[in-house]
Image (cartoon, helix red, strand yellow):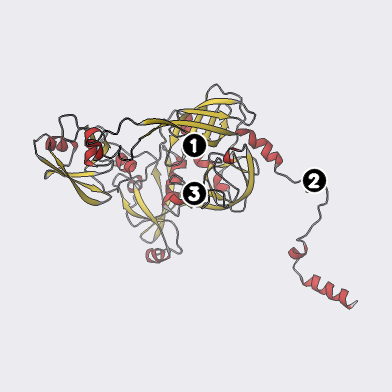
Amino acid sequence: MRIAAFCLIVAAALPLPLLAQAKVPADRAEIGLSFAPVVKAAAPTVVNIYASRIVAQRLSPFADDPLFSQFFDFGPSVPRVQNSLGSGVILRADGIVVSNFHVVGGAEDIRVVLADRREYAGRVILADEAADLAVIRLDGAEDLPALDLADSDLAEVGDLVLAIGNPFGVGQTVTSGIVSGLARAGGDMGRGRGYFIQTDAAINPGNSGGALVDTAGRLLGINTSILTRSGGSHGIGFAIPSNLVAQYVAQAEAGAADFARPWSGIEVQPVDAGMAEALGLAAPGGVVIRQIHPESPFAKAGLDAGDVVTGIAGHPVDGPQELDYRLAILGPGGTADLRYWSDGDEAETEIVLSPAPDPDAEQSLRLGSGSPLNGLAVAALGPALIERLGLPLSAEGVVVTEVAGPSRRTRLRPGDILIAVNGLPIRVPEDLAAATAQPARLWQIEFLRGGRRAMVRLSGG
C-alpha cells in the first residue's frame, strides 16, 4: 500500500506532458498514418531529366594559354559528349518544367521522362546560372499532371516536408524530413547566389531540380544542393523557395529570354550589435547602406549611405542575399513599400522596381585587324554593365567586355577597367581606338582589376 501510495504521489507530481508521452493507437486510422496520399498527388509531377552537351576537350593543358598558343600548335580540340542526370517538376499542364541550371544549362539535347514512363524532348526557354534555375518547355505536351505552388514565405522551421527526385539514378525516390532553417544564404550553401530553405530530408546527387513538397502536396522549393564531405546526404540540404520559382515561370511564360531583376543600386552589410548601438537601433536587424549609386531607386526614394533598410513589401531584410531575393520575387515593374531607419527615426516610402538603366548601351567598341588589340571589345560603364560584371558601384570609365582573337595575349579579362595605353588616358571607348591607332614598338596597358592597379607590356611586332 505504501508503494502504491508513493507511486500515486509521484504520478501526481509529474507534469501532464510527461504522462502523455506514450499512447497506444486507438484505431486503424491512427496506425495507418502515412504520407502516401501526398506522394500519390505530387510524385507524378516530378520527372527525370537526361541532358547532354558537347564540350571541347583540349589534348594539352597549355592549348588555351595565351602565351604558349602563340608559339605552338596544339591541334584542334576534340569534341566530347557530357551527360548529366537530374530531376525536374511539372508546373503547367502544357509542359512547363522547372529544374536547376546545373542540370540542363548549355545542354543540346534534353530528354524528360515522366513517372508513368512517357518521354518528351525538352528545350530551355529561360535559364539563370546565378540562381541555378532553368525553365523547360516540353515539345507536344498537354494535359500533364502539374504541381501547385505553396507560399514559401509561410514556411516555418519544423514544418514536415518531402523531397522527391531521382537520386543516384536509381529511380524516383521520396524522403521525409522537416524545414530545419530559413533565410539561409551564402556561396557555400548553393551553386548560385541565393536565399534558401534548409531541410534535413535526404537530398543526394540526382535529386537536383526535384521537388521539396509540403504536407498539402504543394511545391515549397526546388532542391538544389547539399553540404557534404562524402558526396552523400548529411542532413543539410537546400531548396530554392517556390516564390522565386513562380517569378521565373511567369517571366518565361511572358517570353523573356533572360531573367529580369529589379536593380537596387546599393551595397549593403548586415547590422550587428555594435553597429545597432551606434545607429540608435533597439536591436540588430536590417542592412546598412555602405554605398549607393546616384541612379539607384533607393537614392531616388530619398535614402543615402548610412541609412538602414529594415523591410521590403512587408518582409524583414537582414542580409544582402535577402535583399536581392525580396527584389527578385517582386520582379520589375510597379513599386514596393520600403521601411528604413534614418537619422534616428524609422520611416516608410516606396521604391520603383526596374532593371538597371543602360544609357550608354551604344557606347561600345570592338577593335579590328588594324589594331594591336585586335578582337578586344570594350564599353562605357553604366549601371547595367556594373551589375552584370559585378563591379563596384563607384566604377567608371571603359571596361573590357570580351577578349577574343589576338587580344588574348594581353591576358585582359572581362571586367578589367582600362586606365591608359602608352600613357594616354582612356575615358571613353573612342580614346582606346585613338591610342591604338598610333604606331609603337612597345604597348603599355594600365588597368584596374579587383580594385588593384595592374599593367601589361606587349611588343609592337
To which residue does mark 1 refer?
103
Mark 2 secondary-structure assignment: helix
Indicate the position of residue 111 as horizontal and vertical percent values.
53, 28
Indicate the position of residue 49 as horizontal and vertical percent values.
54, 33
Q: Earlier in the sequence, mark 1 or mark 3?
A: 1
Vertical placement of residue 242 versus 137, above or below: below
Indicate the position of residue 141 as horizontal and vertical percent values.
57, 23
Amino acid found under the numbered disc labelled 3: Gly
Q: Which mark is residue 314?
A: 3
- How far apart are the alpha carbons under marks 1 and 3? 34 Å
- How far apart are the alpha carbons under marks 3 and 2? 41 Å
Amino acid found under the numbered disc labelled 1: Val
Q: How many marks?
A: 3
Mark 3 secondary-structure assignment: loop
Mark 1 secondary-structure assignment: helix
Judge whether residue 363 can be spotted in this image.
no
Q: In this rendering, which labeled residue sits more in front, label 3 or label 2?
A: 2
Q: Earlier in the sequence, mark 3 or mark 2?
A: 2
Give the left or right position of residue 180, taking residue 353 as reference. Answer: right
Q: Nearer the viewer, residue 361 or 134?
A: 134
Indicate the position of residue 109 as horizontal and vertical percent values.
48, 27
Q: Are the residues at dot 3 and dot 2 in contact (C-beta closer than 8 Å)?
A: no
Q: Are the residues at dot 1 and dot 2 in contact (C-beta closer than 8 Å)?
A: no
Q: Earlier in the sequence, mark 1 or mark 2?
A: 2
Vertical placement of residue 183 versus 138, above or below: below
Q: Nearer the viewer, residue 306 or 419?
A: 419
- How far apart are the alpha carbons under marks 1 and 2? 41 Å
To which residue does mark 2 refer?
29
